[in-house]
Image: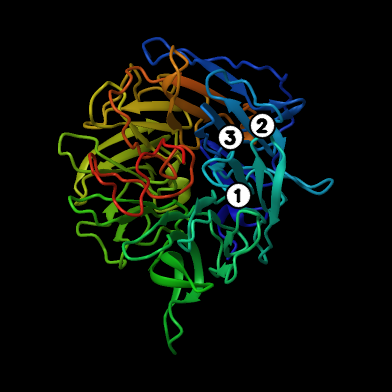
């Protein structure tokens, strides 16, 4: 199926802009090292430590869906982000200065386009004592005719390997899925896992070679980014992934029904074969990336994901956030929950109130009719928070429609529980985790009352503890904003020091589970010692 914006020449809609896949920008911006922070009266969020434009010579980098990725290596914290000019930018987290050998444009034959909407992954493919690699995919709904590939760079900018994906009839070529990196077999090897618009789920070795038994044909386009989790009793991590569905039989049994909408499944690598342990067919596509964490008092992991908007008028499984137990696919009591519209960002799981138990936070569209055109009329999006049992805790409207940003949970006021940072087409919003109230003078009444107003955020911010002393050290937020290309707004990467420095280094959930975006599930249960098997101990810890 050539789903939605993956279809060649199909309509692409982000924020308030509607264009065709053939639209390209002609704007040229000087290669300035410093952007302009848009301060707004009444907004008391700290000014940025630095702002770096994603511009290389005459090549303008429009950042849309690629999220900043951060990690600490060799005592230095680095931040990576992709842009719609096909360049990967790698900067020093303290100064915003580009590292030697960067930026690097992804490989493409002469005359071919390359653009990045996938978020980079910073991964230790050679082990914890060697420098990390930066891995990213190429594919865009805004830049036409792009090369579909996943590429790994060394820390010095040298190309480690390039892996090209195929093409499915009637569908654009590309990888918008952010690569996950983890151990699929239990032998300690760091495998690179991602989905593609060519319908395949891939797993590559650290040298970029396809693992035996891959690719796995999902029978339709894959937008979702995989999450990895090692279930109890298994040596390697399972792959939790969503994909589109345009008529695939749900089983090999004669007369089996066919699935139209989306699949959510658990895929396990066993004896050089990919086995689908469980799956669910939903009658709407799933482009959201699943989050894996604990949302109840037990240590039983749950897979949480939102549904998309391709099928119209919207069928019954639209406007839902789903939750299934990771070990057997059973539906979690109290779920799914209903939303104001489709959800394309990844949910976040963490403790946001005094209950001490994790909640789920997700960004959704606000639609007044059961078709995509009805999602623009109010010029709003929404953030919802639910308890682990599916009870709605609060909802908050954001200025700007059809939000694609994933929320990040992080304490902003020195408390022991998390608040919410979430982007929108109007800018960045800090919200109270316990009530959803706007923080630091922001509000949902007019679009200028945001952080860095007017710099649209279609991705997820990253938070990480930058080692050292002084104002350029400590816990920071890294925001990638600007774009898409049709908006003619050059992308930028900004660094903000958290207003109140947290008293403890909690495992803060965000898109892909950690700032390095390796996709390995995180422990969302506070104070759990020893760590829950199969999850990362702290979202900020480098290997």
User: Mark 3 highlights which residue?
Assistant: 81
How far apart are labels 1 and 2 at the CA level?
22 Å
Q: Residues within 10 Å of mark 3 (few under 14, many from 20)?
A: many
Q: Nearer the viewer, residue 354 or 145?
A: 354
- Residue furthest to the bottom in view is 254
Residue 177 image point, x, y percent: 54, 51
Q: Earlier in the sequence, mark 2 or mark 3?
A: 2
How far apart are labels 1 and 3 at the CA level?
26 Å
User: Mark 1 highlights which residue?
Assistant: 11
Mark nearer the viewer, 1 or 2: 2
User: Mark 2 highlights which residue?
Assistant: 61
The residue depicted at 23 percent of the width and 28 percent of the height is 416
Q: Residues within 10 Å of mark 1 (few under 14, many from 20)?
A: some
The residue depicted at 67 percent of the width and 67 percent of the height is 169
- Quarter of the image holding residue 214? bottom right
- Residue 286 can be seen, yes or no: yes
Badge 3 marks a residue whose secondary structure is strand
Badge 1 marks a residue whose secondary structure is strand
Circle number at residue 174: none
Q: Are marks 1 and 2 in contact (CB under 8 Å)?
A: no
Q: Nearer the viewer, residue 276 or 71?
A: 71
Compared across the picture, whether 35 is left or right of 105 comes to left
Badge 2 marks a residue whose secondary structure is loop
Residue 418 image point, x, y percent: 28, 32
The residue depicted at 32 percent of the width and 18 percent of the height is 500
Q: Earlier in the sequence, mark 1 or mark 3?
A: 1
12 versus 212 height, above or below:
above
91 versus 124 height, above or below:
above
Q: Are marks 2 and 3 in contact (CB under 8 Å)?
A: no
Q: Earlier in the sequence, mark 1 or mark 2?
A: 1
Residue 443 image point, x, y percent: 34, 22
Residue 318 image point, x, y percent: 38, 56
């Amino acid at each position: 199926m050539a789903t939605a914006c993956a279809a060649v020449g199909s309509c692409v809609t982000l924020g308030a802009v509607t264009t065709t896949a053939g639209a390209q920008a002609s704007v040229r911006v000087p290669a300035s090292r410093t952007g302009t922070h848009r301060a707004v009266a009444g907004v008391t969020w700290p000014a940025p430590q630095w702002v770096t434009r994603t511009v290389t010579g005459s090549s303008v980098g429009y950042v849309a869906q690629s999220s900043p990725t951060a990690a600490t290596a060799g005592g230095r914290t680095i931040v990576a982000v992709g842009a719609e000019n096909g360049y990967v930018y790698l900067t020093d987290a303290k100064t915003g200065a580009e590292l030697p050998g960067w930026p690097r444009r992804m490989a493409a034959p002469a005359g071919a386009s390359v653009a990045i909407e996938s978020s980079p992954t910073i991964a230790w493919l050679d082990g914890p004592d060697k420098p990390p690699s930066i891995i990213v995919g190429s594919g865009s709904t805004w830049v036409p005719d792009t090369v579909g590939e996943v590429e790994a760079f060394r820390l010095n900018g040298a190309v480690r390997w390039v892996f090209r994906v195929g093409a499915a009839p009637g569908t654009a070529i590309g990888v918008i899925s952010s690569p996950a990196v983890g151990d699929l077999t239990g032998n300690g090897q760091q495998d690179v896992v991602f989905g593609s618009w060519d319908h395949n789920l891939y797993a590559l070795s650290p040298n970029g070679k396809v693992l035996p038994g891959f690719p796995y044909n999902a029978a339709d386009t894959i937008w979702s980014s995989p999450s990895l989790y090692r279930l109890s009793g298994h040596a390697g991590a399972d792959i939790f992934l969503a994909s589109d569905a345009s008529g695939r039989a749900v089983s090999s049994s004669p007369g089996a029904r066919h699935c139209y909408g989306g699949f959510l499944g658990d895929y396990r690598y066993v004896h050089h074969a990919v086995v689908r342990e469980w799956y669910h067919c939903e009658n709407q596509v799933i482009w959201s990336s699943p989050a894996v964490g604990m949302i109840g008092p037990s240590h039983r992991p749950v897979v949480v994901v939102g549904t998309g908007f391709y099928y119209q008028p919207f069928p019954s499984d639209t406007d839902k956030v789903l939750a299934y137990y990771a070990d057997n696919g059973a539906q979690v009591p109290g779920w799914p929950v209903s939303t104001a519209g489709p959800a394309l960002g990844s949910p976040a799981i963490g403790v946001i109130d005094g209950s001490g138990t994790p909640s789920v936070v997700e960004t959704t569209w606000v639609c007044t009719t059961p078709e995509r055109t009805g999602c623009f009329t109010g010029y709003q999006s929404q953030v919802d928070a639910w308890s682990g049992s599916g009870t709605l805790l609060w909802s908050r409207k954001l200025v700007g429609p059809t939000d694609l940003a994933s929320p990040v949970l992080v304490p902003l006021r020195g408390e022991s529980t998390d608040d919410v940072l979430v982007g929108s087409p109007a800018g960045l919003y800090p919200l109270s985790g316990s009530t959803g109230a706007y923080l630091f003078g922001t509000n949902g009444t007019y679009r200028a009352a945001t952080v860095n107003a007017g710099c649209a955020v279609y991705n997820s911010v990253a938070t990480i503890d930058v080692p050292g002393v002084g104002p350029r050290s400590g816990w920071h937020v890294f925001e990638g904003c600007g774009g898409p290309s049709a908006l003619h707004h050059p992308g930028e990467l900004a660094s903000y020091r958290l207003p109140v420095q947290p008293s403890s280094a909690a495992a803060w959930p965000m898109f892909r589970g950690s700032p390095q975006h390796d996709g390995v599930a995180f422990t969302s249960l506070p104070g759990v010692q020893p760590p829950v098997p199969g999850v990362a101990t702290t979202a900020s810890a480098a290997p």
